[in-house]
Structure formats: structure tokens, C-alpha cells
Image: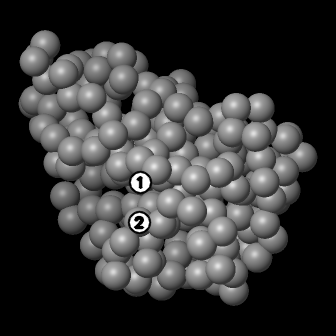
Amino acid sequence: MEYLELHPVNPQERYINMAVDVLKSGGIIIYPTDTVYAFGCDIYNKQALDLLYSIKNDSLSKLFSFICPDLKDIAKYAKVSDSAYKLMKRLTPGPYTFVLPASKDVPKKIWTKRKTVGIRIPEHNIALGLAEKLGNPVISTSVTTRLGEILHNPEEIRIIFNRQVDLMLAAGSLISEPSTIVDLSGEEPEILRYGSGNVNFLENN
């Protein structure tokens, strides 16, 4: 694994570009988000997705979310109602994963059984920079042990996954909960997992 240390607010552009080159070649990376460290790959690379499922020790029914740089092209990846779009606009960028009906442009490999996908727009310049420069969404699934324990320390992550991942972008320890998962596929927002995000917005619906 190549290990690069970045400034979390003003990340070195050359390091972002190196990570994007790895993603374009079908590699797996680890990168920081506004909540925890995440594994990442290009959502359109089938071999990379297969390898990531193996690393995570997850079944294909597990929801893998992905990062978009903004809401501009969101309709390309999901079917978004007006009310869902307005809520996402209020909450992004931020520590939320939004579950939405999948569009045909998203590989079925990352659909749930309900034909939904999880979309993130995190408040973190490294994560957003990766998706923007790649030009495709980047998979975002938390870095955990094979037993599901979230890992926060980059040095520990480096030791455990040194031979399984191509590159890691480190930005210090991330002591946080995972994102709050908000299901927007129905008529009303529903919280599927409580995490870092504030859920006061439910009181206003």
C-alpha cells in the first residue's frame, strides 16, 4: 500500500490525482470522509467492486453507498422527488447517506434488493475532490475489521490492510460515528441508522 498524508482542509492536489489514477486503473483506496475512513473504488469497475466485497467480508446484499461531488448530476444516479431533492439540498454537504431508487446508470451490483442505492455528499474536501476529479461516483463503505469494528486510527488501518489496498490517503484520526442513513425512497423520510447527522429536520416535515 502506498501511504500518503494529506491536509484535511487543503489537501495536496498531486496526492488526490495519484489516488484518482489508482481508481481509474481499477484499484482500491482508503480515504477520509466527514465521519470515518472509507474504502473506495470506481462504481463502474466490476473487478474492483468484487475485490472490495471480499475485503469487507460482506455479502452482495450489503448496501455500499457512493460519493457524488454535489447534487448537480444526481438524477443520473437516482430517481429524486422534489421533496427529496429539497431535503438533500438542505443537508448537504454533511454526514448523511441518502437511500433513493436507483437509476439504470448505476451498476446493479450495488443496488439493494429494493432497487435502491445509497448516496453521500460528505463535508470533506478529500472525499469530494476524489469524486470530482474521477468524474464518476466513488464507493464509500466504512473501514472495519472483518468483525465489523470501525477503525479510526490511520496507522492501525495501514498495518491491517497494507497488502489488500493499493493506496491510502491519511488525514489524522477520525473519531466519529458513521453517517446517518436517511431513506428517501418512500413518501416520508425515514431514518434507517442514527449516526453523526442531526435529525431535527424530521420535526419540520
Query: Which amino acid, mark 2?
Result: Ile
Label 2 sits on residue? 150
- Depth order, front residue of 96/131: 96
- Depth order, front residue of 116/67: 67
Look at the image and name its color scheme: one colour
Q: In the image, what residue occupies the spot 76% across and 76% down?
A: 1
Vertical relation: 163 (above or below) 25:
below
Residue 13, numbered circle: none
Vertical relation: 127 (above or below) 65:
above
Query: Helix or strand or loop: what does disc 1 sit on?
Result: strand
Q: In the image, what residue occupies the spot 21% across and 65% down?
A: 113
Cα gap from disc 2 to disc 1, whole angstroms: 16 Å
| Position of residue 109 in the picture relative to residue 201 (left or right) | right
Label 1 sits on residue? 65
Query: Helix or strand or loop: what does disc 2 sit on?
Result: loop
Residue neighbourhood size for the residue with mark 2, other residues' Cα within 10 Å, grouped as few (<14), some (14–19), many (≥20):
some
Looking at this view, name the residue that lies furthest to the right: 14
